[in-house]
Each structure stands twice: as C-alpha cells, then as structure tokens.
Amino acid sequence: MAECHPVGFQWVVEAKARGAKVFHIDPRFTRTSALCDRYLNIRAGSDIVLLGALINHVLSNELDFREYVLAYTNAPMIVSEEYRGTEDLDGLFSGFDPETRTYDPATWSYEGVTEEAAAGERSEQLDHGREHADMGGPDQYGAGGAAAHPKPKTDPTLRHPRCVYQILRRHFARYTPDLVAELCGISPEDFAELAEAITAHSGRERTTMWVYSVGWTQHTVGAQYIRAAAILQLLLGNMGRPGGGILALRGHASIQGSTDIPTLFNILPGYLPMPHAHQHETFDDYLARAGGDTGFWGRKRSYMVSLLKAWWGDAATEDNDFRFDHLPRLTGDHSHYSTVMGQIDGTVKGYFVVGENPAVGSAGGRAQRLGLANLEWLVVRDLTLVETATFWKDGPELETGEMRTEDIGTEVFFVPAASHVEKDGTFTNTQRLLQWREKALDPPGDCRSDLWFYYHLGKLLKERASSDERDRPLRELTWDYPEEGVHGDPSASAVLREIGGVGPDGALSGYTELKPDGSTRCGCWIYCGVYADEVNQAARRRPGREQSPEAPEWGWAWPANRRILYNRASADPDGRPWSERKAYIYWDEKKGEWTGPDVPDFEKTKPPGYRPPEGALAEAALSGTDPFIMQADGKGWLYAPAGLVDGPLPAHYEPFESPVRNPLYAQQDNPARRLYPRPESPYNPERSPRFPYVLTTYRLTEHHTAGAMSRPLAYLAELQPELFCEVSPALAAELGLANGDWATIVTSRTAIEARVLVTERVRPLRIQGRIVHQIGLPYHWGWGSGGLVTGDIVNDLMPLALDPNVHIQESKATTCDVRPGRRPRGADLLRLVEEYRHG
Amino acid sequence: MADGGLFARWPVIRQLRGQDGRGQAARSARTDALRPRVEEADSVARSVCPYCAVGCGQLVYVKDGKVSQIEGDPDSPISRGRLCPKGSASKQLVTHAGRQTTVLYRRPYGTEWEPLDLGTAMEMIADRVTRTRRDTWQQEHEGKVVRRTLGIAGLGGATLDNEENYLMKKLYTALGAIQVENQARI
Ligand code: SF4
C-alpha cells in the first residue's frame, strides 16, 4: 500500500500512531513492511490457506462475534442434504462435470429450495450450470447477487450438522497453523500472533480491517480469496462498521467508475446484467432471472426501465418493453482474452483501444500482438504512441522474425487524447467517491477528450444509419448533448446529469425515486442523486478541515453519498451501538429514525422491530435487523448457496503453474479455472523441474501500470530507470547471479532479461520440507510509449489461466526459470523457449 | 542578517555555523527574490490526480495558456495536500515533449506513419465501423435473436472519466458491439 497507494497509506501510519496494530502479509518486503508492526513473508498463491486457518482458529475456539453472526449472517441456515464438500469429494464440490469442467450448483442450495424451485428456472441452473459457468457467475444477478431462498430453514443454536456454521467448521478443520507453515512459509508463532491480534481487535469495542489489491485478485481462485476474507470479517463482526470492512485498493484513477458504469462485456451500468440470448429472451424473463425480488435489488425493474429510457427516450414505451430488445445478447464468455482469440481467429475485425496498452499490460503479450496484427482496423487513443499502436513497426515479433511489417494488414489510426487537465469530468476513486475535475485549459493540436471522440463518432454513425431494422437502436438512441468550446465538446455536466437521473420535475435526488413505469430516466441507478437539486454534487469541495472525518461535503459517494456500506450493521439488532467507542449509525427512538455521522444505509424510518408481512417484495421484505440490504435475504453470506461458479466455499488450490503439490486434496488446482489450450497460449507443466521458481509481479511507486503515463516522464524515468528482478542472496549464489548484472527469466511463453537485484527483502521459504525461491518482477517497461527508458515486457511471461468467476488472469503466482546473462536475440530466443517447452 | 559580511552571509557558512540547514540559513538574496510559480498563475483549476485510485486532490496552475505547476490540494480530506512521486510529476505528464498531438495513420501493409487530418480520420473510422458492423452482423445465433456484431471490440476505460465510459457503453450497445472490456478485467 505504501508503494502503490502512497498517499492513502498516510492514514494507516496515522492509525498506527494512535495505537492500531498493522500487519503486512506479502511475498515481498516493501516500504509497507518497513512501516508496519509485523511483516509476514508468504508464498505467492497460498493466501486461502492462511485465511482458512484464521477462520478455523475463530471457529474452533468459538471466537466469533456470536450476536452479530446469528443476527446478520446466514450461519444458521440449513443446507440441502445433497450438498457434498471438498472433505467428502477430495477437493471437489458436488455437481462437478469433469468433461466440461463446470459445476451445476443445484445441490449447494438451502434445504428445501431445490425441490421448490421449478426445475431449470433459476439462472445458474439452466443447462446444468454450463451457461452460468461460461458467463462468469455473479454478475448475472446484478448488485444483489444470486437469489437464494429468502426464508430457508434455520437452526439458531448452530448445532444442526448441515447448518452453515457447522459446514464451515468441517470445511476449514484441516486449515491449521501447521498447514500454514507447510504451504505459506509462515511460522506457527507468527501465525499465532496474527490470529491473536485479529480476534483481540474484533468484537463490540474494536474492529479489524483487511486491505488488498490485485495481489488477491490475479489468481485462478481470485474471487474465492475475497470470499475467504469476507467469511472471516463476517464471523468477527467487522462488516458495516467503522474501522472494519475489506478494502480493495484499485490501481487506476477511475477503475471503480469503469466498473460502475462498465466498459465491461457482462454488465450494464449499476451492475445490471447484460441480457443473455437463452435466459433473457423477453423483458419478463430478464426480470425474473436477473437476481432476487427481495431487498433493494427487488427494484431492478425501476433501475432497468430508467436506464432504457435514458438511452432510447420517447421511443422506449411500456408497449415495447421500453426497447429491451434493442440490447444485444450475450451467448457466453466475451471477455478480454476471448476477444483476443477472436482476433487471432479472424472474427474480430475492428478494435478500439482507449487509454489502455494491452501489448504491454495484458498477460501473454504475444497473443495480444498476434491479435492486433490480424485486425482489419485498429483505433488507438492515448497521450503517447503506446506499444499497442506501434507493434507493426517495432514490436518484439519483428525481431524474432515471427512478423514482418510488410505482411501486417492492420490499418491503424492513432487519434491523440486529451489529458486529465484538458477536460472536465468525474473519476470514481477506490472508496466509491466521485470527484469532479475542472478543466484547466484546452488540449493541444488534434488531442481531444474521449467524450468528444465518442460523441462525434456517434453523430457520424447516426448520419450513416439506414432505415434497416438493424439500425433502429442507433437511430433512436438519445444523443443530444449541448456542445461547448472551440471544438464542440459535448457538455460533461449534461452527461453526468443524465447518469444521475431525471424525472418530470428535473434531477432526481436518489435511487428510491426511480419508477418502473417509464416516468424517470437514469443512466446508472447507483449514481442516482449525483445531480440532486440540479447541483453537480461531485464538484463539492468544502475543505476537509472544516468537516467531520466522513467529510460528506467533499465529492459524492455512491450510493446516496454513503461513506460506509451496510452501516446498519454498526448497531446491534435493537438498533443500539455495539459500544460507545464504535458507535456510528444507530436508531433514535424518539425521532423514530436512524441517525449518526453518515447517511444510514437503511430505510431511514424502518424501526429495528419491523418484520415483513408475508409476500412482501423489495426492501419491504427485509426486517429491521437485516443490514445487507442488497442481498435478497438481507444477510451476509458465510456460505454462498448460489452465484459462484467454482464452489460455495473457498478451498485452497495451488496456482495453475506451481512448484508445490497440494497436500489438502487430490485436486491440485481450481478444477473450474479457465484456460485457452491453443498454440498461442502454452503452459508450464505442473510441478516441472524446468520451471522451479515461483514468479510474482508488482508495481513500483515511481511507475504506473504498463508505463505509458510514467516512462516518458523525466523525473519518474530517472527514479526507476530499469527493469530488475529481485532475488535472494541464496538464490543468487546458487545460480551465479551478480547484483547489477543481467539475468534471463524464462517461462513457456517467452524469455526476458532484467537487471539482477540481490536483496534480503526476498527470503527463500521452507515449503513442504524444501526450499522454494520466489522471484519478484515489476512490470512497467516496454519498448515505446515515448518512454525515456525501455525494457522487456514482464507480462509476456504470464500464462492465460483465468479465474472462472471474473475472467482475471493469474499474474501473481506462476513458475519460471532464471539464468545468468542476457537473453538470446532474434530467432535464438524462440529456440531457447522451445527447448524449455519440450525439455 | 545581523552578522554582516558577504562571506558570513553565504548559506553554506551559516549552515556550518549551526543554524538550521532547512530554515533561515538556507536562504540567499536569490532565493529571497524567487516567487512561487503558483503566485503568478493566470488561473487555477481544482483537479484530481490521474494515476492511482486514491484520488488525491490537485491544483492545476495555468500561465500564458500553459500548465505552469501542479500541486497537491490542501483542502482534500483524502490527501491533505500531499502527492506521491507520480502525482508530483504529473505536470510532466501533460507537458512532456513525447506527447503525440497529431493524428497518425498507418495504411494496411504500410511501413511508415502518415499524417492525417482529424476530420478525415473521424469520417474514415465511421465508415469502417459502419462497414464492419454490416458485414459481421448477427441477427440470430443458435436459433435465438442476438442482434449484435462480434466484428467490433473495445478495450479501455479505467483511466477515463465516468461520463466517457458512459457514452462508450451507450454507443457500443446501440451498435450491438458486446466485446467491450477494460483494465478491471486484468
Ligand atoms: S498522488 Fe499518488 S497516491 Fe495520490 S492519487 Fe496520485 S498516484 Fe495515487
């Protein structure tokens, strides 16, 4: 965190000064480690073992926050008799089909639910879970997650052998401190200190917070890493409370925003799922299957109708299902890496790349560049000539002889972009906070904002639209934004107002005002209210020192300007603060409303004693003690009866490429992980002696992602001029690597060279009785982007092995070999990699 | 300066004599005459750092139509005026000489970039989208209506504004282009 989110880390330092205990768990020793109380060196790819052992520690010593767990989680729910877990099936859950490597999640549900649900009705069960698995599960159900039965059978004593609490106990029983030592390389003493600290600092009086970044997501089990943390935090009562939670530190200025208003294939704004051709033929099918009808997600019709009205305006009416049929349909996985395979296969012909540099930033870069070289046309928009724009002229495949410029048919347009100071608009930061940027000046030359580019492209495309039915969605698309300035920029405020929602009386003040009848328009329901009172709320800048610590008048946080999500959980079931020192949102009996320093994440006047009437829908179906208001049952899920494609509980699987055998189960790696078994995407053999070392990647403080925003800057280039690999003195001695000299790092994909940095910061780990060495590589270099410094592309080494829930690649833990000296040039490089592949 | 004499006023001597090296003793006539760049700015815009998602506040100073300085915004409750090395270097991000400010075009099988007028580029891109969309249109797939094209894809968004992502998703969806992805996937 100190390295990659340095200014955010000031608050950790401040908390530590006020008595907080800070642990840093990471395969590499960094500035964060230097400033924390205790650094734990962990083998990359083993975190579920550590988290699972913490869960086991809490459960076997009954250290859970029992009142919280009973009231706010699904611990008492009773699970179907047909469910079998990894303890029964040696690493698999019930419902696995080895042929398609997918799960049918039917048996994971609560007792009685399987029989109740009409066969094949629930989204995740269509086609025995195959479509569910194809699409990546959770996003199909929107922000509410999958709909489990809202009122299953329960056992409040938590003794029933099939209640969630007991299933958890059995599932994690073998996750012990000894196993942590064996697989993570963390000693039992260090583990005990961590376990003691997190349990001592949880409960009524205290809270513990977990912070993670892509070190937890870039794995074939990434989503389950986060699930494991969620289970631990729910057991300890650390969700929805001040100083609690699981904080994702996101790496780009508005990567949160680009997920909320997604340039992603499987969702629409506000986590509404993109419709699927088979499951969502009609609007009614869509509403019936896209998540539950209870909780705030039960208002999904209002959210969706308001979105369709924002896009198709007067053409969207009740009679035509508000033009639901204008939405294109998915039929499976259309994610980034699948799209690249489509380029190589010739189905994808035109490609827009906007402020991203996949030739350097995506895993297995060679496949990326083979894809680019097979396009008919490519449009790149960026500040500099990024490698993605120039691969045809100076890419590494020209040097190896795999490509020749004269043979590459791709037509390339480079259309320069405006910088962040040359346009106005909002970023959404890592805490869901929208902050408006004022424009400082006009962009130079042909540089234009992406708002300008897409708006004017849209106008030109609308002009070209024919009278064909195919073009109707384009013809009817609302596309009238006031133009401003010398270049005719569309007004970003007008776009934000459309996103924030309007009704008959102007801008809306919150998502509860959205209507299912077409009388409101809103481009992203979770952002509804960002333009309340016709004021750009994201532009508010009342100085922090003049406000409470929540600073509610600085920017605007979605939803409804709430700073802590699910903050109803900061009070006990009766609405009283859990303790004086952790008071946050609580029930004011006299006023009959929830109050506190934040906006309550609950209906303001719903009393703690409220119990829903039979058949209630949407939020009315949740009781006054259900804090997780987006969930269909209002509960935090320790066990996920539906929604994930690789199991209802996290289980430790080794990374797809690992030097270590999984001692827990016969199942070595995630059985449902997604692979691309094709020549462009070769893999290192399992536990191959040719690739004996663990390889992990990371960022440096002085550079940014694929480097196009940092390599061209003199200050930053000078601070970190060269690619290096971090190795321990022991490994350096073993391989004859000298500090400052060159090393070559090899995987089945390619070989790259880097300067050797011999450092005690990398420590060899004793894993299963033998020494395992880890290598660390920062990945910011490339050959172009106007960079003042150049270097080999680290991501070229990485495998295309993906998490099946979210289609994120495993770049945080793989295997490699290291040898002294520079890498071979030209065709010799291919020969070296070929030798390694075939041993 | 009470202790007079040119030599005695030389900052190094004063620092050696034990005055605080970061305070009075570091000053000279030249440094006394220096004015901060921010004082002379024609305008200042309240902005946000474009790198990571902490979202530190920035003040962007403009003088004679150019960015003259970018500093941390002390009003921000997130950053309290601080910026890390990247945020502090961001004036170079917007002013460095390596920025490409004109449209470039590479024709199929071409070996060099060629200049192209922005308006022409926009028309050419619109023509290609229209053509590819028509040629690759799928009204149905496996017997179900899909009304889409798999011929056009988009990548990027995490470095852009919400408003930009919104227009992108809106336009792509109306075109039937579904392979739209960004950095959140990697
Ligand atoms: S100044 Fe540094 S910490 Fe702050 S937003 Fe920019 S990159 Fe992130």
Image (tube, coloured by chain):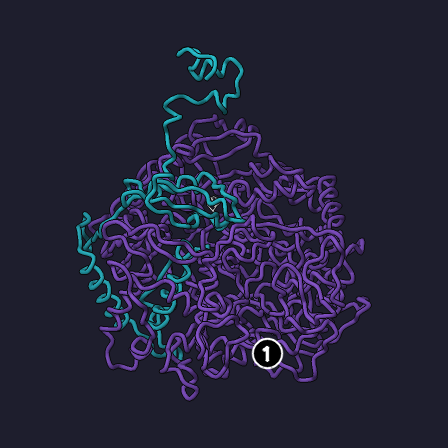
Chain colours: A purple, B cyan
Above or below: residue A269 compared with residue A704: below
Viewer-closest of A340 and A618: A618
* Residue pictured at 42% horizontal, 82% vertical: A322
Q: Is residue A746 left or right of residue A52?
A: left
Residue A41 locus on image (x, y percent): 62, 39
Q: Is residue A98 visible?
A: yes
Find the residue positioned furthest to the bottom. Answer: A319
Q: Is residue A686 visible?
A: no
Residue A672 locus on image (x, y percent): 55, 62
What amino acid is at disc 1?
Asp
Find the residue positioned furthest to the front. Answer: B2
The quarter of the picture where residue A588 lies is bottom right
Viewer-closest of A33 and B42: B42
For label 1, count other residues whose C-alpha is less than 10 Å away and answer few (under 14), some (14-19) or many (20+): many
Q: Is residue A501 left or right of residue A191?
A: left
Disc 1 within 8 angstroms of ligand 1 (CB): no
Above or below: residue B103 compared with residue B23: below
**What element does badge 1 sit on?**
loop
Q: Is residue B105 left or right of residue A756?
A: left
Q: Which residue is mark 1?
A: A293
Residue A767 locus on image (x, y percent): 64, 41
Above or below: residue A536 compared with residue A750: below
* Residue pictured at 45% horizontal, 65% vertical: A535
Q: Quadrant of the N terminus of chain A?
A: top right
Residue B100 locus on image (x, y percent): 26, 47
Disc 1 chain ID: A
Viewer-closest of A665 and A540: A540
* Residue pictured at 73% horizontal, 71% vertical: A608
Viewer-closest of B155 and B12: B12
